[in-house]
Amino acid sequence: MKKVYLITIMALVLLLGQTTEAQTCDCGTCDWYGTDVPICCESCSGWGWYDGGCQRSCVCEGSCPGGTTTTAATTTTTAATTTTTAATTTTTAATTTTTSATTTTTAATTTTTAAAGLTAYYCDVDSMSSSLPMTVGGNLNSRTEATSSQYTAIASSDNSRWTTSDPGSRDEVFLWLENSVTDSGISSIDLTFEGYLSGSSATFSIWARDVANGEWDQIGTTQSIATGSDGTMTRSITSEIGNYVSGQTLIWGVYESTSSQSLNIDYVNVVVNTGGTTTTTAATTTTTAATTTTTSATTTTTAATTTTTAATTTTTAEGGLDCSDALWWSETTVYENPGTRVYYNGNLYENNWHSEGENPEENSGTNQVWTLIGACDPDLIPPEPPPPPPPVDWEGKDGYATRYWDCCKPHCSWTDNVPAGMEPLRTCTEDGETLNPDDPDAVSSCEGGTSYACYKFIPFAVNDELSYGFAATESGDVCGKCFEMQFSGEGKYDPTPGAVAIKGKRMIVMATNIGYDVGGGQIDIMIPGGGVGAFDGCSTQWGIPNDQMGAVYGGLLSACNQEVGYYDHEAIKDCLRAKNDELFRSRGLTEMAEGLDWFIDWFEAADNPTLIYREVPCPQELIDISGLVRPTDTTTSTTAATTTTTSATTTTTAATTTTTAATTTTTAGAGCTCDSGCDGTSRSAPFTQNGSGTYCWQVTSMNYINSWSLDKLEINDVDYTNVWSNSFPAQIGGVWYIYYDSSRSWGHFEAN
């Protein structure tokens, strides 16, 4: 009898163990667009997940679109029963069963995704390292998609190459690639690049973008490729595949570490491997000895029982997702960066590539710009955008604000760069406060000299809605001019929280500098920690290594974006406050810390906010700080007039005398609408003008003119905008007055 009990107990333990294991794989089902799919029991995010412990595909609870499944409370009552078993004797003969060893192998299959499913971009970048987000305003300067002929060139390994542009000094090439892949059952992904760098050998690396946090991870080791002939490198993603594939899209890229070199691309390819499995069952032999079991007559009475199962509720995506960090989708906003999450009509979406004006609800799904993540908890949605600002009573040009502080001597600090009769901007010594006694001839700190920008040029708030500051603008006669900006509540590249928060605020800045990398309505505000840009005098002035000052373009804000992301507004501001204490306050750089405080608190750490702007009279506060006062004759439009006087004449004839009275005829000046007056700068053909700005010239001789991308070009008040011509109106006083106006950095005019 002891053996019988032991076997019974062991069987019960085995049965209970099996029951427990089965229960861990029963976490409910999801109505996945008409199909019941198991909900994953393991912690996960996304969809199409492989529930390893249960050996099946499943859907994460937070991604289920089907709502809430509720199991009502149930009560089961079992009536009392009595069962009588008669005495029996059973004899089982000895048996032996042998199972031979078996091996089942499932062969691996491979699916290749070639350039036909490819989107490729040439990117001009400052640098590349782990966790960089690759965003414009951060380390990404520009991104340009391949042309149809360039796609053809890289579709096969045949020595027909796509040669990119030279990114320029201190910039490198990053090849951004997006492939469509199958996102289930993947064992590994092979990424292949074939090509070389023009001009020199270079170190290449392959990267993949983590879809969860937007960061880029280097895949495998680097490889050196000599110039002049194609080198081939393949790196494989072998683990955490789900981190890199989202909505059947894989984003990866190739980076070369040598600046000022174009990249020659012969071939790129992605191979997706679906892994095979091998299962081996060992040979076994089971022998059952002969047994005789006698069961005596028994009577078992089971009392009536009642079992009550409490009501349970499983909450899926409907009412479950925390969408508080997402952005409200806007039809007018450009969503530049893949992976941007937006809230629309109760749901959370994520873009797979650049999007503008594409409604997520109508443009989500396979091979669509948006991917539906799931429904949002009504209590965890982002705050509504602020209402539109009150209408302005003036019309302005469209633009956007960037930030910089390079510590260099500003453009307007040289005599030759300001209008005649205007004192140049004063600069300071290395302490940032003492006026430089050698100005305006002192050499800039960015050229090894001792002339620095003064700390007093930091921005400051006038009230909650208005601030003053100083800025670099596009090339031209801008020194001492002031511009009023009103912020529109959006970002040039993404509607980041800071850009949304300053909607309707105004700022007036005085131009003290120009930027050869500034254009297209860009106003580059002087903000400590805003990035040194093309030049760096701050490392010398402050004794701070360049890499501690954040990104070259974007500064400390770009560094914080890399650390805490782009959309947690308070986390971004806290990060900036910590860097302010570490970088400026700890070194006693009080004015610099105050300027960065303004950026955090009044400017809301806005990243490249869009705006409208117009030229306005300068506030006295900015004139007092800078000392820049423009001559009055350069700020008032003047049209010269000509006066012709015919002297009185007297003619005497024998019988009569006729007197003609003196007459005066005044002719209004014509041919010039320049703000600087009709005494525009004299120019001699041939000459050209590029970029944005407004100019007036006097030209005495030319054969033909040509222009493009201008807002207006006039010759003696006759319209010649964006045309080639060798026929001109009559000269006025021996000259042609040419009026040039362009709001674009690529505007062009030439006279020959």
Image: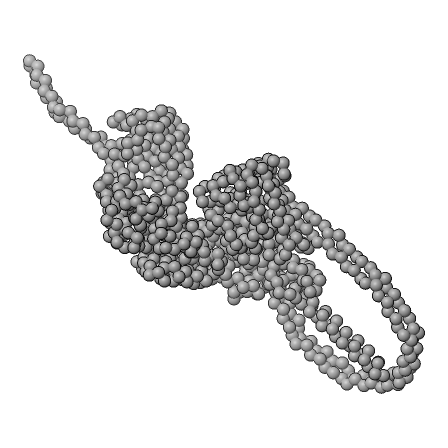
- What residue lies at 63% left-to-right and 42% top-to-bottom? 116
Q: Nearer the viewer, residue 583 or 673?
A: 583
Give the image location of residue 4, x and y in percent: 84, 80
User: In screen coordinates, is 538 left or right of 140?
Assistant: left
Can residue 394 be seen in the rendering of this structure?
no
Q: Is residue 220 left or right of residue 726?
A: right
Snapshot quadrant of residue 691: top left
The colour scheme used here is: one colour
- Count numbered badges in the picture: 0
Q: Is residue 696 visible?
A: yes
Identified at 46% across, 62% down, the residue is: 571
**Which residue does the image show at 8% across and 14% down from the upper left?**
653
The residue lying toward the viewer, choosing from 330 and 155, is: 155
- Residue pictured at 36% horizontal, 50% vertical: 537
Tell which of 87 and 140 is nearer to you.
Answer: 140
The x, y position of residue 141, in whole percent, is 46, 46
| 345 lies left or right of 524 | right
Q: Quadrant of residue 671?
A: top left
In the displayed structure, does residue 13 sit left or right of residue 747? right
Q: Quadrant of the N terminus?
A: bottom right
Which residue lies most toward the top here? 654
Quadrant occupied by the C terminus:
top left
Task: Give residue 306's position: percent from left, percent from top.
Answer: 72, 81
State the image coordinates of residue 242 (x, y, percent, origin top left).
62, 56
